[in-house]
Image: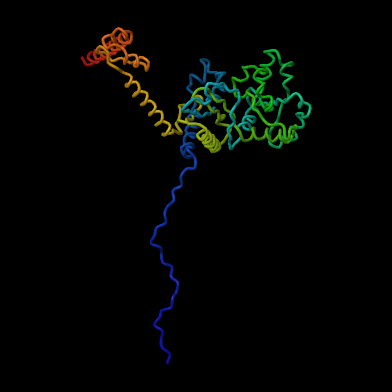
Amino acid sequence: MAKKSNSKKSTPVSTPSKEKKKVIEKKSSTAIPRERVIKAVNELIKFTSKPQDENNEEGNNGKKNLLEDDEEELKKDLQLIVVNNKSFTGTSKSFKLKLLNVKHSFYKPWKEASATAVKDFKVLLILKDSDIKKVSEDDLFDQLDSEGIKVDEIICGKDLKTVYKAYEARNAFISQFSLILADDSIVTSLPKLMGGKAYNKVETTPISIRTHANKEFSLTTLTNNIKKVYMNQLPVKLPRGTTLNVHLGNLEWLRPEEFVDNVELISEQLIKAYQIRSIFIKTNRSPVLPLYYNQDVLDELEAKKDKIEETHEDDMVTIDGVQVHLSTFNKGLMEIANPSELGSIFSKQINNAKKRSSSELEKESSESEAVKKAKS
């Protein structure tokens, strides 16, 4: 008789793991949380959608204000306010625009919107004198029309010296255009040829592009670079100061999520390239909404401020019972001077310190009197 096996059949049983799966929190890959940008853009859309006061909309006779359309368009212009820790360009003045990458074209919707605007969206191309006959508007039309891009006029440096040499003629011609592209080999000579007025606006400041490959003019290189600027880049004018305005276009040009994409990408580039302190978003007629601040940069500024204050306190000395601020040179002079003569040597500093003290006391007494009168 066969013995029964005492071993139980090993059947695979799925036992629930006691260990809980760790929930991985998704962190924003950008410096500014996307939700914050979405909320800010939506709030600005709501704000600009509010109707204007009746006094602004209608005149005394009930007719529409002639400037209403312009005001309506202006109040929807979206912009970033970017504050840097120090000057963006230093002491030197730069005529060259900085190009920021964007996910959604800035120029394409601008051109579409210009169909019903006062000013048409037009593109000017400036080439070297030797290249002007190597390409025509028709050649560029064949290469660019599929992308909805049109170069309206092509000129060379010689034209600016002759045809548009007169101040009025030159300014009238340049002001027609919303985008000016120029061969990178001549862009540095254009401020003199175009005049300073052209560089007051971003839209009439020429953007340098490559037109040559292997030291030869190339239609392919030219058209590729035109497409790159038109479809994927946004020009900004870097200021000498610490505050940069980045114009993002009219709120009606793009969908809200497209503006959010562009804001994220632009902010990321600027934060990486500079010591950005803070970033805000607004329209021409709205309050400013905060998007970003860099605590490390703010801490650095605070540390510098504290250091300056400490240095100022260290420079204070007492002469004849008066607290006086002395420069490094005067402190050295004080060390070698006769102590009995310090009052006469630094009489000017002592008198200034006394005046400051008396004015501060007067201010305090006047404030206390004002408080007493308010209480009585």
Q: At x 46% / y 47%, what residue is drawn?
A: 26
Depicted 41 relative to depicted 206: above or below: below
Quadrant in which the N terminus appears = bottom left
Q: In which quarter of the image is residue 165?
A: top right
Q: At x 52% / y 19%, what residue is drawn?
A: 58
Question: Looking at this rendering, what residue extends furthest in the left direction?
Answer: 376
Tell whether 346 sits left or right of 189: left
Depicted 268 relative to depicted 158: above or below: below
Tell whether 117 sits left or right of 364: right
Residue 341's x, y, as percent?
A: 28, 8
Q: Nearer the viewer, residue 350 or 114?
A: 350
Q: At x 78% / y 29%, what residue is drawn?
A: 134
Tell whether 72 sits left or right of 209: left
Look at the image and tell me whether residue 333 can be seen: yes
Residue 313's x, y, as percent?
A: 32, 21
Question: Looking at this rendering, what residue extends furthest in the right direction?
Answer: 133
Look at the image and tell me whether residue 366 can be seen: no
Q: Quadrant of residue 13?
A: bottom left
Q: Which of 362 and 292 is in front in this view?
A: 362
Tell whether 344 sits left or right of 98: left
Residue 273's x, y, as percent?
A: 52, 33
Q: Which of 205 and 357 is in front in this view?
A: 357
Number of numbered discs visible in the structure rendering: 0
Q: How is the image coloured?
A: rainbow
Residue 296's x, y, as percent?
A: 42, 34
Q: At x 44% / y 76%, what residue is drawn?
A: 10
